[in-house]
């Protein structure tokens, strides 16, 4: 009887989790809309960002270009729970964390060696067709660099 109750709980839990992830407005493919964006000179550009529900977690795949225009690619798998998870393929950062603020807003941060390198906020438009990523980092001169990247859902 206990086994049956535990199995029922687990099935309900994972079904609920799948529904929550499917309802996340970030899930999908996002393309950078350069004409609406204000990306600071000399900073990388993420041209395509893909969010996929992956077994109770979210997988984020990012393709773009670095400050010299060379292609970049990195991947992150984790949860939007405020914890750091490793980034694969990003020489500037080794972990990223996301924290859900409300239904359409998440905070994020990238770290290198435990030090926060970039902070940001992603806001998905109420209609779900676009999102705005505002990031803050330190430039080579130590001054704050702010970029605003607008993405269209594909």
Image: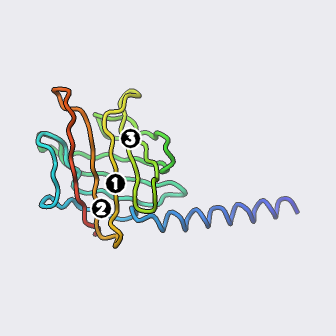
Which mark lies nearer to you, 1 or 3? 1
* Local crowd size for mark 3, using a 10 Å CA cut-off: few (<14), some (14–19), many (≥20): many
Which disc, if any, is residue 131?
2
Q: Estimate the spatial distance between the alpha carbons at disc 1 and disc 2, rounded to whole Å.
A: 7 Å
Residue at which label 3 appears = 87
Q: Among all residues in the image, which is located at the extreme bottom?
A: 127
Say which quarter of the image contains residue 13.
bottom right
* Local crowd size for mark 2, using a 10 Å CA cut-off: few (<14), some (14–19), many (≥20): many
Q: Estimate the spatial distance between the alpha carbons at disc 2 and disc 3, rounded to whole Å.
A: 22 Å
Q: Residue at x 48, y 67 (%)?
A: 22
Q: Is residue 96 above or below residue 116?
A: below
Q: Quadrant of the C terminus?
A: bottom left
Which disc, if any, is residue 17?
none
Q: Position of residue 99 (x, y in %)?
A: 46, 48
Tell me if label 1 and label 3 are in contact, CB under 8 Å: no
Q: Among all residues in the image, which is located at the extreme right?
A: 1
Q: Residue at x 38, y 59 (%)?
A: 51
**Disc 2 or 3, which lies upstream in sequence?**
3
**Disc 1 or 3, which lies upstream in sequence?**
3
Tell me if label 1 and label 2 are in contact, CB under 8 Å: yes
Q: Is residue 44 left or right of residue 123?
A: left
- Of helix, strand and loop, which one carries label 2? strand
In this view of the protein, which residue sits in the foreground, 39 or 55?
A: 39
Residue at which label 1 appears = 122
- Of helix, strand and loop, which one carries label 3? strand
Q: Position of residue 127 (x, y in %)?
A: 34, 73
Q: Position of residue 153 (x, y in %)?
A: 29, 67
**Disc 1 or 2, which lies upstream in sequence?**
1
Q: Residue at x 23, y 51 (%)?
A: 46
Q: Is residue 34 left or right of residue 116?
A: left
């Amino acid at each position: 009887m206990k086994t049956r109750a535990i199995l029922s709980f687990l099935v309900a839990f994972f079904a609920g989790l799948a529904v929550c992830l499917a309802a996340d407005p970030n899930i999908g493919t996002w393309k950078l809309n350069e004409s609406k964006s204000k990306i600071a000179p000399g900073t990388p550009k993420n041209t395509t960002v893909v969010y996929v529900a992956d077994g109770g977690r979210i997988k984020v795949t990012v393709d773009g270009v670095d400050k010299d225009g060379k292609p970049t690619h990195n991947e992150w798998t984790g949860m939007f729970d405020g914890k750091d998870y490793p980034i694969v393929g990003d020489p500037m950062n080794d972990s990223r964390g996301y924290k859900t603020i409300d239904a359409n807003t998440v905070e994020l941060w990238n770290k290198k060696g435990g030090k926060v390198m970039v902070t940001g906020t992603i806001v998905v438009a109420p209609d779900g067709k676009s999102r705005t990523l505002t990031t803050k980092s330190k430039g080579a001169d130590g001054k704050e660099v702010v970029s605003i990247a607008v993405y269209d859902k594909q």
